[in-house]
């Protein structure tokens, strides 16, 4: 009896996984969200902030100059002079300088650096006033200057506050120290040469006769 050939097994068919076309098609059909343009451009916001800083400085200056103009001006005048002394005028200058930098430059960073420099300069000058003239420095100046002097001594506190003042001015005004130092060195050299050189004789004036023997 002949053996029958073994039946070959057919490979099982894999089920086709339906592609998730729904999400892709829906996502593809969605229109990109349109961003609304801001009401004020960054440059306009920066310039408005600069004008506001200048206006605030002028307002505080008017309060310091004429305190009797209203019910708020008098107490604000007394508080500013009590806290800052004559340094209140330094705060006015700092606000105006910061506003000017914001209006004249094209970056927010310049205004931030100017504000930091002005604040550092005002605090350092208040500290120097607290060391030199405590009655004019206000409560803040009397706290900064003598407070640093307690740890570093009067000479050390003065040197540190002068250094902070210079750093603040450089930050506030973008002052370059190198050209200033070179100009100062040239001026000192020229002044030293003028002092050491003999005075030239002016032409047209007769020389006095030498005294003869008696």
Image (tube, rainbow, N blue to C red):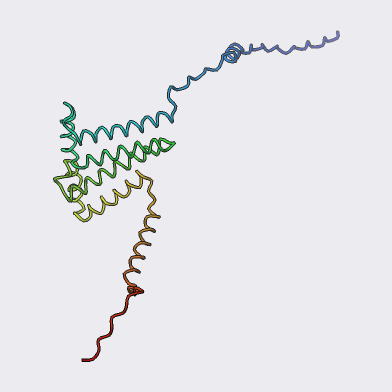
For the residue pair 56 and 158, the one nearer the viewer reads as: 56
* Residue 160 at x, y percent in the picture: 26, 52
Q: Quadrant of residue 211?
A: bottom left
Q: In which quarter of the image is residue 53?
A: top left
Drawn side of residue 74 relative to residue 103, left or right: left
Drawn side of residue 21 relative to residue 166, left or right: right
* Residue 162 at x, y percent in the picture: 27, 51
For the residue pair 150 and 77, the one nearer the viewer reads as: 77
The residue that appears at 24% across and 36% down in the rendered structure is 61
For the residue pair 103 and 16, the one nearer the viewer reads as: 103
Q: Residue furthest left?
A: 135
The residue that appears at 34% across and 36% down in the rendered structure is 99
Where 143 falls versus 188 (above or below)?
A: above
Q: Quadrant of residue 111?
A: top left
* Residue 9 at x, y percent in the picture: 75, 12
* Residue 17 at x, y percent in the picture: 64, 12
């Amino acid at each position: 009896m002949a053996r029958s050939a073994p039946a070959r097994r057919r490979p099982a068919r894999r089920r086709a996984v339906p592609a998730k076309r729904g999400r892709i098609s829906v996502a593809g059909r969605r229109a990109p969200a349109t961003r609304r343009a801001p009401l004020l451009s960054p440059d306009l916001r920066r310039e408005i902030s600069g004008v506001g800083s200048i206006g605030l400085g002028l307002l505080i200056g008017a309060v310091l100059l004429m305190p009797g103009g209203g019910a708020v001006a008098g107490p604000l005048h007394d508080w500013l002079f009590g806290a800052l002394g004559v340094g209140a005028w330094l705060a006015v200058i700092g606000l105006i300088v910061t506003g000017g930098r914001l209006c004249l430059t094209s970056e927010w960073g310049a205004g931030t650096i100017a504000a930091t420099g002005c604040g550092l300069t005002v605090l350092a000058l208040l500290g120097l006033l607290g060391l030199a003239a405590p009655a004019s420095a206000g409560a803040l100046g009397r706290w900064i200057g003598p407070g640093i002097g307690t740890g570093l001594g009067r000479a050390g506190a003065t040197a540190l506050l002068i250094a902070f003042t210079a750093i603040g001015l450089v930050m506030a005004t973008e002052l370059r120290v190198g050209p200033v130092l070179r100009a100062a060195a040239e001026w000192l050299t020229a002044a030293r040469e003028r002092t050491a050189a003999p005075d030239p004789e002016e032409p047209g004036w007769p020389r006095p006769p030498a005294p003869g023997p008696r």
